[in-house]
Amino acid sequence: MAASMLCRRTAALCRTLSGISSSKAVLSGNSPCVFLLQAASYNPKPLKLNLRAPYIPDKDDEKTPEWQKTARYDRKLFGRYGAASGIDPASLWPSHEALDKLIADEKEWHPPLEVRVRNVEAKQKAAEAKRLAREKLIAANMAKMPKMIADWRREKREAKQKVQEEKARRAKLLAEAKHRFGFAVDPRSHKFLEMVAEIEKEEKKKKKLLKRRLRDEQVAAFTTPPAASSSVSE
């Protein structure tokens, strides 16, 4: 390609110079135009381009790019020019570490058919075991469902009952406050809170006394000996 382009450019230059040389006859003497025409009509010999010789970079030269000094570029040169590249084919063979890595990658990404079949079977067994475990869990949860529903309904009833008891207690406290103070009291007021604290303190005291009395009665019943029957004494 380079040779054909150079030939075309040379032919065009020759045609131009031949046109100029035809008009040289009308000029004479030592004028600058004569020297200009002589210089323009100079036809040098074409350059000898050796386009068949391969380009082999000099690795010892500092101007050579680093990518032309790599083993990848050497493989490229040897693949293109063969022995004419001057590269030893043994140097292009991968090292033991690189070869082991290639073999490991080949086994990992392209395993044999037997290994692929075993992997597929293992995946199918794992999926089947997972499905059976899920079905077993669902069956166990379904068996617990009646009890869970009953517990949920009981908790809902207890929560509703607790809310009702809290409302009744609040209404009772408001009625007690109205009876004690003679007028309706705001439940957020300081008087109402003091009254509630006093009532709770009294209730705790009553519960404590009742608990102590029950404990004393149990202790007395445990320590009192049973009365001997008359039939045994006779």
Image (cartoon, rainbow, N blue to C red):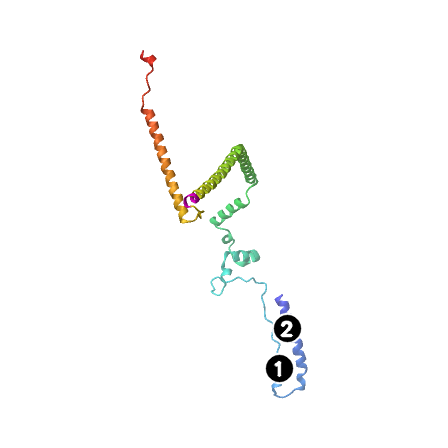
- Front position in the image: 106 or 189: 189
Looking at the image, is mark 1 or mark 2 earlier in the sequence? 2
Q: Tell me if label 1 and label 2 are in contact, CB under 8 Å.
A: no
In the image, residue 171 above or below residue 2:
above
User: For residue 226, what is the image quadrant?
Assistant: top left
Image location (x, y in percent) of residue 51: 59, 65
Secondary structure of the residue carrying tag 1 is helix
* Residue 21 shown left or right of residue 117 in the figure: right
Q: Residue at x 46, y 42 (%)?
A: 171
Mark 1 closeness class: few <14, some 14–19, many ≥20 residues within 10 Å: some
* Above or below for 53 versus 233: below
Name the residue tied to disc 1: 38
Q: Residue furthest front?
A: 182
Direction top: furthest residue: 234
User: Is 163 displayed left or right of 5 in the figure?
Assistant: left
Q: Secondary structure at mark 2?
A: helix
Residue 215 numbered tag: none
Outermost residue to the bottom = 29
- Give the numbered dot on residue 10: 2
Marks 1 and 2 sit apart, C-alpha to C-alpha, by 18 Å
Image quarter where the C terminus lies is top left
Measured as percent of width and height from the top left, residue 161 is found at 49, 38
User: How would you rate the neighbour count of disc 2 (Cα within 10 Å): few for under 14, some for 14-19, many for 20 or more?
Assistant: some
Residue at (47, 49) in percent of width and height: 97
- The dominant secondary structure in magenta is helix
Quarter of image, res 112: top right
Give the magenta-colored segment's residue range.
Answer: 177-181
Query: Residue 117 lies in magenta, yes or no?
Result: no
Residue kind at label 2, given as amino acid type: Thr
Q: Nearer the viewer, residue 155 or 206?
A: 206
